[in-house]
Amino acid sequence: DVKVTQSSRYLVKRTGEKVFLECVQDMDHENMFWYRQDPGLGLRLIYFSYDVKMKEKGDIPEGYSVSREKKERFSLILESASTNQTSMYLCASSSAGTSHYEQYFGPGTRLTVT
Amino acid sequence: DAKTTQPPSMDCAEGRAANLPCNHSTISGNEYVYWYRQIHSQGPQYIIHGLKNNETNEMASLIITEDRKSSTLILPHATLRDTAVYYCIVRGYNTDKLIFGTGTRLQVFP
């Protein structure tokens, strides 16, 4: 079974703190994704990576950065957390470019910035 | 990628078929229709996808109209565990990104 794990289910941080959200997948997938989910807005793509050290901006990259030093690990970084970054963060992974294309999601991290 | 339109919410009695519609009138010929669902407090989960033909798997059936401008996800015998938000997504042929809308919240009642 594909497994995508996220470092925390719940996280509380203070405004201005640097925050790291970690995601690990065990299926040797090329692609990894970070989304945030807010009520009434659905899932929005922040960043994705299609290979080690490669990244592309999604729809809402402002205030975030990412790191992918190893194939199985994709980190989302909030350089200086703000209250408007309080959200549910979801990580996903997928193999690249197959006709049967499926993204596998982790359980999510609910981040509260106070 | 083509946009999709779904009703915000639907109800279904347990044991009955749940038919969830999706409009994707701007879909192009090589774009796939995907369905995912998200049960409360979990990440989204793949259900099914199709290009032109109707598809069926152990979870659901997908009916795509001949002009491909709309589709219907069918859960043949809904259970309480099918209560979730269902997302209809059109995937571009040359991308590995999925664009999630706000989906349909399906409530299955006893």
Image: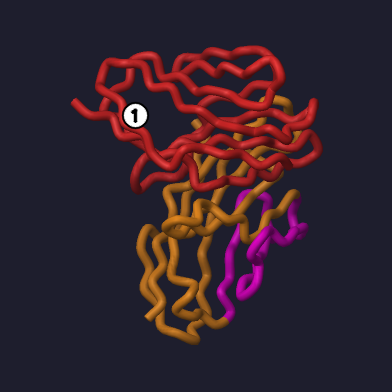
Q: Position of residue A109 (x, y in %)?
A: 42, 59
Asked if the magenta segment contains residue A77, the reply would be yes
Q: Point out the stretch of residues depicted in magenta.
A: A51-79
Tell me what hue chain A is rendered in. orange
Compare residues B101 and B44 and report the one nearer the observer. Answer: B101
Q: In which chain is the residue bearing label 1?
A: B
Q: Is residue A104 left or right of residue B40?
A: right
> Which residue is painted at 31% across and 31% down in the image?
B11
Q: Position of residue A23 (x, y in %)?
A: 53, 55
Compare residues B84 and A28 and report the one nearer the observer. Answer: B84
Q: How many marks?
A: 1
Q: Quadrant of residue B15?
A: top left
Q: What secondary structure is found at the residue carrying circle 1?
A: helix
Location of residue A45 with respect to A86 vertically, above or below: above
> Which residue is painted at 76% across and 41% down in the image?
B95
Tell me what hue chain B is rendered in. red
Q: Position of residue B43 (x, y in %)?
A: 45, 45
> Which residue is painted at 46% across and 27% down in the image?
B20
Q: Quadrant of residue A65?
A: bottom right
Q: Which residue is mark 1?
A: B82
> Which residue is painted at 42% across and 58% down in the image?
A39
- At label 1, the amino acid type is Asp
